[in-house]
Amino acid sequence: MTNTPPAAADGARPPQGLPAPDNESSTGGAGGNPIPAEGRVPPTHPHAHPPTGLDAHLIVDLKTFHLDVTLKAAPGDVVALLGPNGAGKTTALRTLAGLTPLTAGHLHLDGTPLHRTPPESRPVGVVFQDYLLFPHLTALDNVAFGPRCHGATKKEARAQATTWLTRMGLAIHTTTKPRHLSGGQAQRVALARALATNPRLLLLDEPLAALDARTRLDIRTQLRHHLAEFEAVAVLVTHDPLDAMVLADRLVVIEDGRVVQEGTPRDIARHPRTDYIAQLVGLNLYKGQADGHTVTLDAGPEIATAETLSGEAFVAFPPSAVTLHRTRPTGTSARNLWHCEVAGLETHGDQIRADLTGELPLAADLTTVAAAELDLHPGASVWATVKATQTHAYPA
Amino acid sequence: MSDAAAETLESGPRRRRVRKGVRRGVPLPLLLPALLGLAFLLLPLVALLVRAPWSTLPDQLTSTEVWQALRLSLLCATAATAASLVIGVPLAWLLARTDFPGRGFVRALVTLPLVLPPVVGGVALLLALGRNGIVGQWLDSWFGITLPFTTTGVIVAETFVAMPFLVISVEGTLRAADPRYEEAATTLGASRFTAFRRVTLPLIAPGIAAGAVLAWARALGEFGATITFAGNFPGRTQTMPLAVYLALQNNPEAAIALSLVLLAVSITVLAALRERWVSPA
Amino acid sequence: MTRSARRTRRTLQAAGVGAAALLALSACSSGSHSDSTKSDSSASTSSSPKLSGTITVFAAASLQESFSTLGKEFEKQHPGTKVTFSFGGSDSLAAGITGGAPADVFAAASPKTMAIVTDKGDGVGTPATFVRNQLEIATLPGNPDKVASLKDLTKSSLKVVLCDKTVPCGAAAQKALDAGKLKLTPVSYEQDVKSALNKVVLKEADAAVVYRTDVKAAGGKVEGVDFPESADAINDYPITLLKDAPNAAGAKAFVALVQSAEGQKVLTEAGFLKP
């Protein structure tokens, strides 16, 4: 799979028309600000233990696409690369596996430089998006393939493979050909196959994307369990925030080939720094200049906040914090009041989500009853209020 | 052509399903030309059968030369197919899986023997590998090997003419096959060659089989390059097509009889191979 | 020959005629039909007919060089005429004629192939032998193997090619070998005389038994060696008018040219013997 230049995000709703936050300044450069992981010796450290884990600066220059991503992780870490389609997640994964060459940068795994090492010599296991189980081999022989290539005899390899399949709960499917496996079983065989070579780096490309919604829930839980047991670095690529948050200890958000934000799932959910992330976690996000309790957006409007800040800042609030009125409200305690127009309406769970344009573009959630009472329809003129206490402001 | 052949070698169950679909009704604009095409291909064979000298057939086929020629034909066609497999499959892989400057040109060159009149191919082989050829003279003076007028020469000529069929067929299959299986294999520690041998090769086996059948059939019927490069000597270089051609000069009945033998043998072999390859898939 | 067998042969001949017929047809289509009917009426009586139209000559491959020369000469002598040739193996030409190819003249390399046509009644009158061809040994230039006789060819160190016994030059070579009580195992029995010659031209074979005319035509690329046994295997070349000739008058005039002193000169220069 090659990466195409960033295109329309799959299924994700279109940007909410906020003034686009400047990605570059928000991350402090493409080199990223590595978040120190516990118990990890920084690779630049001149002495002490040999460095362990992953330390990579991946630069790939394709004609139409530029990737520049820094990734660091300690053994036991599960890192999720999250981003819209075409952001470069898969390219990043392929460079880690050695399937796409690095144009520049470096790749160290447990202190060993790997960027010149061919894929077959890297201690890396990959679970591909559609698993790519060898169709002509049984589940057992698929898993035994790796050990065989690493010099085990046929018998040893099969014994190891049996152990892995048993661990995955697939002991009765050893002689099954991949086309007779269910999606979930195939996913587990693929995982077993990748783990059977005892990799120091496990890569998973959209490991749950090929599954239907029901098995997905189940397999996600199992995968979380297996990843928790895995003692080396695991990097998974996904465009699904839920997968990322459930499976990973740390998220690295990639847009247009660059890291735009990284941190724990909780961190990122609370402090989104780009529209894409804000959408993923369901927040309205704005960027502007803070002065005391007010953030003045680049486009003009002001937002009153509870926090006191100064300088560049983000303001975020959930769509549920927005109250809508058909006439200009009087006597409201809300400090934020904007005149908007309904651009679109859609069902969102048991709520209605209103997409608003006007003074301040934003998303608002309201109950079906409220929507009916307000007689909302596209083109309707509304007033939106948000309490300052329901906003969350943080430095950019 | 190669694609169509590959199609016929697809797995059994799928074929059957397709056939069931056909029964729902074939559009007339397809059916009529299809039947015409079939008739066009079969009519000459039917004519051969109708006009065969059935009463004298047994006498025509008793001469040892006939069986000698048939044995030689089968031997050489099979050897040429084997040679084509050994060097043609890697060539197809190179063309399908690697990128090098002038690859398009090389691909065109590979198909050249398809458009070259076989006799010209034979002359070209003589100029290259003959006793006085640009490479052949060294083969002769260093190793004492001369290819013209030998059975090996027949195999060389047949390989030259038949291999492009195999290469084109295999290359097409390789291009259609998902290269990511090879990638998956390399991430599991397989060298590129191991990945090719243990993953790609089994995956494209139907395409290779189809290509091999095409090459074998082409080699079996080879005339021009063979007679030009290897000459004609009973038992050594006289294959069935050569025997048929020379019989045609003064004994057309014998020529028809020989053609029938060649026809019967090839149909038997091709049908048997098809059965064999279709069932286990 | 049984009836069914005869039919078989006929079919086969009909099939073989395809290419030749196409050639001949394309030649005919150049407006020769209306012309030939006009000249036909006067041709039978007039002693110096005004010839025109296309004359189609089917001739043995060995006649290619000399007949092409004669064709040009003929067109010069009779402005407004065009001589088209179909050169090929005498067998396939004969098959073409009996299969209905529209030809005016047939010149064969052996009486046997001529008989195929005359037996069917497709010829006019008795074919006349217009030249004879003798075998010669073609060796590499300079005769490095010092071949001096037919017997020398039986040395096992030499790679010799013969024509296949089914074609005239092969049959003749066999006759010569029989006459000399020699046994020769060649490396190949070639499908026609030109292929045999080419093997020597390309230096793949050390020697070949071919016709003198072929040695001549090859120029300096081979060297000819005469041998006495060839006298026992001289090939007669018969020529005949064809019954269904679209241009009978032209055909007659062309045959006359071939048999004239002028025609014989061209042919002997090519290495043929006078009849």
Image (cartoon, helix red, strand yellow):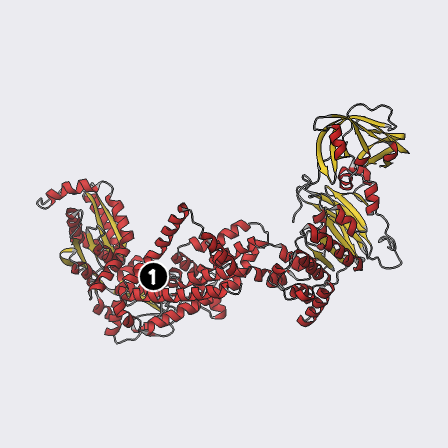
How many discs mark residues in the rendered view? 1
What SS does tag 1 mark?
helix
Three-letter amino acid code of the residue under disc 1: Ser
Q: Is residue B157 left or right of residue B171?
A: left
Q: Position of residue A29 (x, y in %)?
A: 80, 41
Q: Residue A75's quadrant in the figure?
A: bottom right
Residue nearest the observer in this picture, B171 or A144: A144
Image quadrant in which the C terminus of chain A is located: top right
Name the subunit of mark 1.
Answer: C
Residue bearing the label numbered 1? C195
Residue at the (16%, 56%) spot, across then down: C123
Residue nearest the observer in this picture, B6 or C228: B6
| Up-down relation of residue B137 to residue A392 (above or below) | below
Q: Is residue A71 visible?
A: yes
Q: Is residue C84 left or right of residue B119?
A: left
Q: Residue A86's quadrant in the figure?
A: top right
Q: Position of residue B40 (x, y in %)?
A: 35, 53
Q: Position of residue B59 (x, y in %)?
A: 27, 72
Q: Is residue A139 left or right of residue B144?
A: right
Residue at the (16%, 59%) spot, across then down: C118
Q: Is residue C198 left or right of residue C104?
A: right
How many residues crowd mark 1 within 10 Å: few (<14), some (14–19), many (20+)? many
| Up-down relation of residue A198 to residue C150 (above or below) | above
Residue nearest the observer in this picture, C52 or A282: A282
Q: Position of residue A10 (x, y in %)?
A: 68, 42
